[in-house]
Image (cartoon, helix red, strand yellow):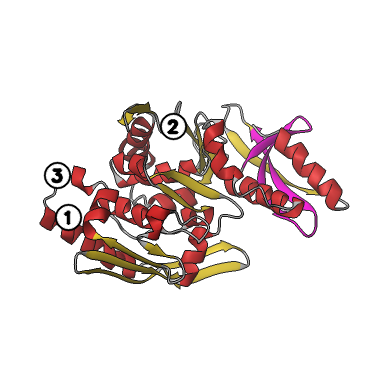
Amino acid sequence: MSEIVKYNNDFNLLPMPELKAIQMDMFMAIISLTKDKKENTPFLKKFFNPDKRKIIIPQKKFIELCRLNDSKMDYKEIFFAIDDCLKKLCNFLISYQKDERTIYNFVCFEEANIIADEVHITLQSRFYDMIINKKFGFTAFELAEFAELSGKYTKTLYRLLKQFRTTGKAYFEWEEFCRIMKIPENYRQIDIDQRILKPAIKELSKERNLFDQIRVPFKNLAYEKEKTAGRGRGGKVSGISFTFKPENIQMQKLENESQKIMSDEQKYLKILNNMKLNQVRFDYNDKLWQFNDFDFDEFKIIAIELVRDEYENLNFGNHMHFNAKNQEQFFKMIETFRKGIR
């Protein structure tokens, strides 16, 4: 079986370094080796020390893990490809705003070297904590399946959609989506469709043979752009939604691991964070709403009404503040909205 890449959902929001597709495989291999003490399997214990946040792995084993042997590069080319990737990781600086009250600024790796045929990598403490903290949701996928994909856009979309593997629905605001995908600013909508989205959708929804099994990363994968109100069929693209067949119950066991010890407060806070991150849509009082924000302490949920125009485009309408009197009513309100999710 392949190693599992598993990390905090916040990682999906990060502006990634400029990596080639094959270097993305290396980066995800590093993440797959990064575990906390409870998750450190006998295989991983050979290569990762959680107390020092340090990976030491033979270069040959690292090449196997990244499936670089399957590439057309010779050993010298592989060596310099690894070295180039490690240099980029050492310059990987994170600076992003998660919400109105939270801004992160930190480097991700303290060192990344090749020493005597071994790869040595030490994660910065803040970055390590972000990767292993899966309390309020995580993304998980098989490293081998990720490595089988071609192209950086396809790989990035793959890991973004894996966050929503159990729901089969994902929504992103357009500017945020373009930032995460690193889409060139001079690309027109038709360029994005033809050069990025359609090729990625085609590859992510086709059958492939992995471990002698026929697999499809995302069955029935499709996307739809949404526009703000405009004249005729025009309007500015404001968001993009993806739909696909959710993964089965067996795959959901990964997510259930983090729910076993949750209190009600932790459980519903996780639900709200997921609803906000996914920008979920739900039916309530014969209207369609999109989740926008919440205040856990004030028992408040903020949603935007969605209205279809004469051309069947969904447009944003009024904001609504849904308030509860106490925590018990607040939790009931959350459950009501969850039941109406489309």
Quick check: 292 above or below 97?
Answer: above
Marks 1 and 2 sit apart, C-alpha to C-alpha, by: 30 Å
Residue at 45% in and 30% down: 221
Q: Amino acid at mark 3?
A: Lys
- The residue that mark 3 highlights is 72
Residue at 50% in and 55% down: 39
Marks 2 and 3 sit apart, C-alpha to C-alpha, by: 27 Å
Quick check: 38 above or below 224?
Answer: below
Q: Between disc 3 and disc 1, whose residue precedes?
A: 3
**Is 329 in the magenta?**
no
Mark number displayed over residue 218 = 2
Residue 209 placement, left or right of 75:
right
- Circle 1: element type: helix
Using a 10 Å C-alpha cutoff, classify the residue at mark 1 as few (fewer than 14 neighbours), some (14 to 19) or many (20 or more).
some
**In the image shown, does 154 or 45 lie closer to the viewer?**
45
Q: Between disc 1 and disc 2, whose residue precedes?
A: 1
Using a 10 Å C-alpha cutoff, classify the residue at mark 3 as few (fewer than 14 neighbours), some (14 to 19) or many (20 or more).
few
Q: Confirm whether residue 21 shows in the render.
A: no
**In the image shown, does 147 or 107 lie closer to the viewer?**
147
Which quarter of the picture shows residue 229? top right
The magenta stretch is: 280-307
Quick check: 189 above or below 87?
Answer: above
The rendered magenta stretch, by its main secondary structure, is classed as strand
Please report contact status of discs 3 and 1: CB closer than 8 Å, yes or no: no
Q: Amino acid at mark 1?
A: Ile
- Circle 2: element type: loop
Residue at 23% in and 52% down: 63
